[in-house]
Amino acid sequence: MKALIITPVKDSLETTKLTLKAVSQAKGDSEYWIFDDFSKRETREYLQANQFKYGYSLTHLEDVTNHPSPNYHLVLRMAQRKAIEQNLPLIIVESDVIVKPDTFRELITLNNRLRNPGLIGAITTDRAGNYNFPYGHEKRSRKGIEDTRRSLSFCCTLISPAYLKRYDFGELSEKKDWYDIFISRQAKRLGFRNYLSKRTTVVHLPHSSRPWKQLKYTSPLKYYYYKWVKKRDKI
């Protein structure tokens, strides 16, 4: 059971280390690719030095583009091409997520079993097992696999080969920063189904790569200043 697994990295070195270790222990025969999005020197050097240890390929985006970070549109286009070439599902694992040994096996199995999947997301929890951002609204009483109308986050999410072949990520707007909501909605428009697996849990350490987003909880006025006046996080 194979997939193309990717992690976009923008500093947040301590959580990135946790992500790399967990993915390396869970990936099996799957290919793992890291996209370093103009990180600081310490992060770049760590990623360079640990490729063999954790078994990943590494692309420094500063070697292929002058576009300032974030470069999620470029990461998605490059990853889509790689996945289509190998006829594999694409699994995105963010650099603040800790997967479990069976996470990828479960997602790939669901992709093969569920009806017409577009995206399949693993639900996120804190270290104590409580649902947290971005799925804190979900009810624990509802177990299993949900065919959801809500958008899925890219925290730990599989994109099916059928959807990758149907929608060209080259059409994504470069005026945006993040694309999980758009890609989720586009899957529905094209007739695919999006699923949230509550039996596939991953630990999420939210906003580690974007610490200013913590201001939403401590200083909302500053948060919305960054979001609207500074135009951060365009989705």
Image: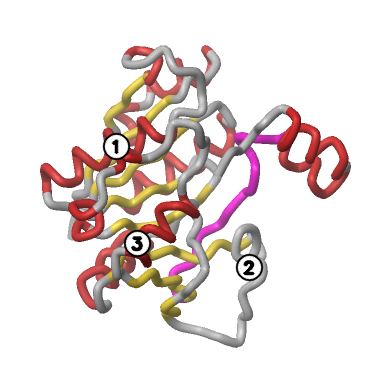
Position in image of residue 20 (x %, y %):
42, 39
Position in image of residue 175 (x %, y %):
50, 32
Q: What residue type is labelled 3?
A: Ala
Tag count in the figure? 3
Q: Which amino acid does label 1 sit on?
A: Gly
Position in image of residue 136 (x %, y %):
66, 66
Q: What stretch is highlighted in magenta?
A: 199-212
On residue 131, the disc is 2
Residue position marked by numbered label 3 in the rendering? 187
Decide: few, some or many residues near mark 1? Use Cα within 10 Å; few <14, some 14-19, many ≥20.
Answer: few
Residue drawn where x is 79% and y is 46% of the image: 216
Position above or below: 13 against 160: above
Q: Look at the image and tell me whether residue 88 can be seen.
A: yes
Q: Look at the image and tell me whether residue 102 can be seen.
A: no
Mark 2 or 3: in front is: 3
Residue position marked by numbered label 1 in the rendering? 170
Mark before the other along the chain sequence, 2 or 3: 2
Decide: few, some or many residues near mark 2? Use Cα within 10 Å; few <14, some 14-19, many ≥20.
Answer: many
